[in-house]
Image: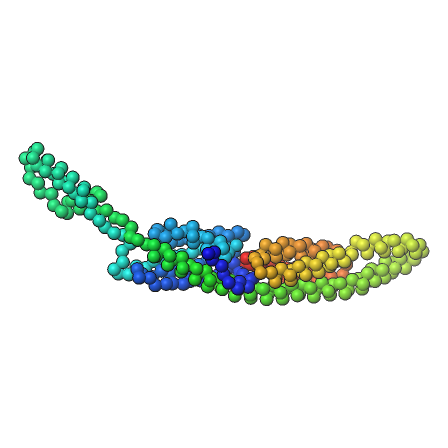
Amino acid sequence: MPFVIDDCSYMQSMTAFASHEAENKLGKLTCEIRSVNQRFLELSIKCPDFLRASENALRKLFSQSLSRGKVTVFIRFYPNDDTSLTDLTVNHALIKQLNACAASIENQHQLNNNVSVKEILNWPDVVVQKPSDTSSLSQASIDLVKSCITKFIDSREREGAEMKNILQDKVDTIQKLTAEIRSIVPQINAHLKSKLQDRLDDLQVDVNEERFEQELAFQLQKIDITEELDRLDAHVKEFNRVLKLKEPVGRRLDFLVQELNRESNTIGSKSASIKTSNASIDLKVAIEQIREQIQNIE
């Protein structure tokens, strides 16, 4: 049965830490999981050699519950005093052959056979070292990692919940600034019309009314930011929708931040008022703060 984290509430931070340990009749197993932000899922498992056969199963556990982050896993085993992970057996057939060779040398060359047990033990392959049955440790390690992953996800979600609150606050700031800019657009347009009229009055030049309206429309078109404000509103609406999704949202939010930044830059470049210039700067500050936060969101 696939390993699934129940009631995953998202969003999740990619920076987290968790540890867990379990006792076994052979000793104690410990697991530590650490992660930092990464564009994709990069998993590194450091474990005892007897667990290498279970590494693929361990990797599947992580791939089922994580999608992004540089994750490092440390699994350690501390055996009991009477626990050995290897069994020693004697190669009796080889010893018989060694004795036969010694006897042959004794008979052929009239030498005394003084081969000792110590000398026999020093001969290669007389003592055979075989791994003990570690199947119970392998299963215990998998169970341990499952428990540790659950704690790890909880840690990511707790930090993710804090980041979500911060993001929501910044998005609300952007929405508020957008509304403020939109409210002063009529004042900016009226000021531009008055400014053009004052210049003509100073020059004391009679101007065709229709020609004046055309020039005014041209100037207003150059500074018009209505489309940018509409797109900002649309991006903010989408941002709020994505924040509620029950899935990894880091990449979507990163794309939306790029779009928000694009619109705020355009508003700044078209600014015809100190108010819109200041609001544009405030927009960029809020967007940059969002960008920094989502670097750690899965």
Task: Say left or right for 94 vs 197.
Answer: left
Does the image show residue 268?
no
Residue 147 showing in the rendered view: yes
Image coordinates of residue 96 in percent, x first then y, are 15, 41
Give x and y (percent) for residue 220: 81, 56
> Which of the two residues, 170 or 16, is positioned nearer the viewer here?
16
From the image, which quarter does the C terminus lie in?
A: bottom right
**Residue at 20% over, 47% down:** 90
Q: Give the colouring mode of the picture.
A: rainbow
Identify which residue is drawn at 18% across, 42% down. Answer: 93
Residue drawn at point x = 52 percent, y = 66 percent: 158
Image coords of residue 115 (percent x, y) = 11, 43
Q: Nearer the viewer, residue 190 or 238?
A: 238
Q: Which of the two residues, 166 or 93, is positioned nearer the viewer here?
A: 93
Q: Residue at x 92, y 54 (%)?
A: 210
Q: In this view, does 218 lie above or below 109?
A: below
Q: Is residue 87 left or right of residue 14?
A: left
Q: How many marks?
A: 0
Q: Position of residue 71 (x, y in %)?
A: 47, 55
Relative horizontal placement of residue 84, taking residue 42 as reference (left or right): left
